[in-house]
Amino acid sequence: MKTYCGAVCEGCSFGEKCKGCVSTCGSPFGGRCTAAEYIKIGGMAAYETFKEQLKGEINNLLKAENLPAAENLFELVGEFVNLEYKLPSGEKVKFLDDKNNYIGTQIEIPDTDICCGVVADTTFILICTYGKDGSNPEIVMYKRR
């Protein structure tokens, strides 16, 4: 399969779920893909510039929360990063779309069993913390861009 961002599809665990990036015009799971949107319009250079700007914005937010900086950002499939958060009312909700591809990273917080997750696209940045395998996620910050 041919991709816009250069991802290697061979051996991918998504198999039949993924319909291919180029063959779906950048919607391999049926939703939006931030990487494909940038690359189709401005090429890889525009996408890399966007990621660097986004990383700077994310790191400023992480610093304000006394969290470690993000070293790299990656393409993330919504199904993997769409955690279920417990609201004060006790209701559990998901804020992302399983069909979209996002940009983000996971950051291990030193001397703890907790990770910080960052997920973003062109419209928002979500920062959360969670335990092993995404357990007990808590939103640290949700910021509209």
Image (cartoon, rainbow, N blue to C red):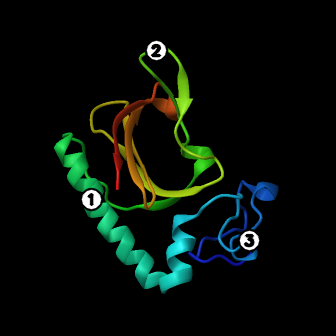
Callout 1 secondary element? helix
Residue type, mark 3 in image:
Thr
Tag 1 near tag 3, CB within 8 Å: no
Vertical placement of 16 versus 112: above or below? below
Residue drawn at the location 25% of the way across and 55% of the way down: 59
The disc label shown at residue 24, or none: 3
Front residue of 132 and 124: 124
Image coords of residue 38 (percent x, y)? 49, 75
Please identify, in this view, whether the residue under mark 1 or under mark 2 is nearer the observer: 2
Q: Which residue is mark 2?
A: 89
Image coords of residue 41 (percent x, y)? 52, 82
Callout 2 secondary element? loop
Q: Which image quadrant: the C terminus?
A: bottom left
Determine the image quadrant of residue 15.
bottom right
The disc label shown at residue 57, or none: 1
Cα distance in 3D space between marks 2 and 3 = 40 Å
Cα distance in 3D space between marks 1 and 3 = 30 Å
Mark 3, other Cα within 10 Å: few <14 / some 14–19 / many ≥20: few
Q: Earlier in the sequence, mark 1 or mark 3?
A: 3
Vertical placement of 42 versus 103: above or below? below
Residue type, mark 1 in image:
Glu
Q: Which image quadrant: the N terminus?
A: bottom right
